[in-house]
Image (cartoon, grey):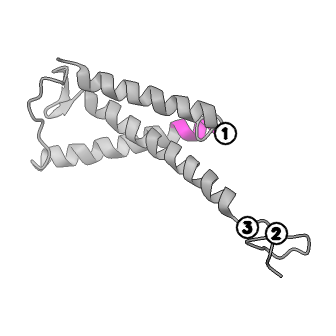
Amino acid sequence: MPGLYLLAILLSSAGVAALDARFRLAWQPAPARTAAAVGIGTAFFLAWDAVGIATGVFVKGDSPLLLGIDLAPHLPLEEPVFLAFLCYLGLVVWGAARRRLARRRPEPAADGVARRDAEAP
């Protein structure tokens, strides 16, 4: 079924965006920085793909799941969409990891000394 791969990427992106909106991991705290990181990351990976295509390392396989629209030889329409999704997913995971690690840090006691548990002297 043509377009199924693109549909899967878009649905996955919607799921990641829902998590991002719910937990305010990337877009909400810094929309300009998030957009710039996704744009720069996508451009970097597209340049990487271009080098791979030019050297013959990357070739487009035949799949009935692709739309069949090529932006360049061996570069299907789905590729930049996937790369943008990959960059956005990385930012959301990074935001979640930072939040999780921040919760695990020991809080300083009243005397200013960090303690891991209440029984520490």
Q: Residue at x 12, y 28 (%)?
A: 63
Crowdedness near tag 2: few (<14), some (14–19) or many (≥20) residues, C-alpha within 10 Å: few
Q: Which amino acid, mark 1? A: Pro
Disc sitting over residue 108 in the figure: 2
Q: Which amino acid, mark 2? A: Pro
Q: In the figure, residue 74 lies in which quadrant?
A: top left
User: In the structure shown, which secondary structural element does the residue marked by tag 3 occupy?
Assistant: loop
The residue that disc 3 covers is 106
**In this image, 86 relative to 113: left or right?**
left
* Residue 35, above or below 68: below
* Mark 1 or 2, closer to the camera: 2
Mark 2 touches mark 3? (CB < 8 Å): yes
Disc sitting over residue 29 in the figure: 1
Q: Which residues are magenta?
A: 30-35
Q: Which amino acid, mark 3? A: Pro
State the image coordinates of residue 46 (x, y, percent, origin top left).
30, 41
State the image coordinates of residue 1 (x, y, percent, origin top left).
17, 17
**In this image, 76 relative to 38: left or right?**
left
Q: Earlier in the sequence, mark 1 or mark 3?
A: 1
Q: CA distance from mark 1 to mark 2?
A: 26 Å
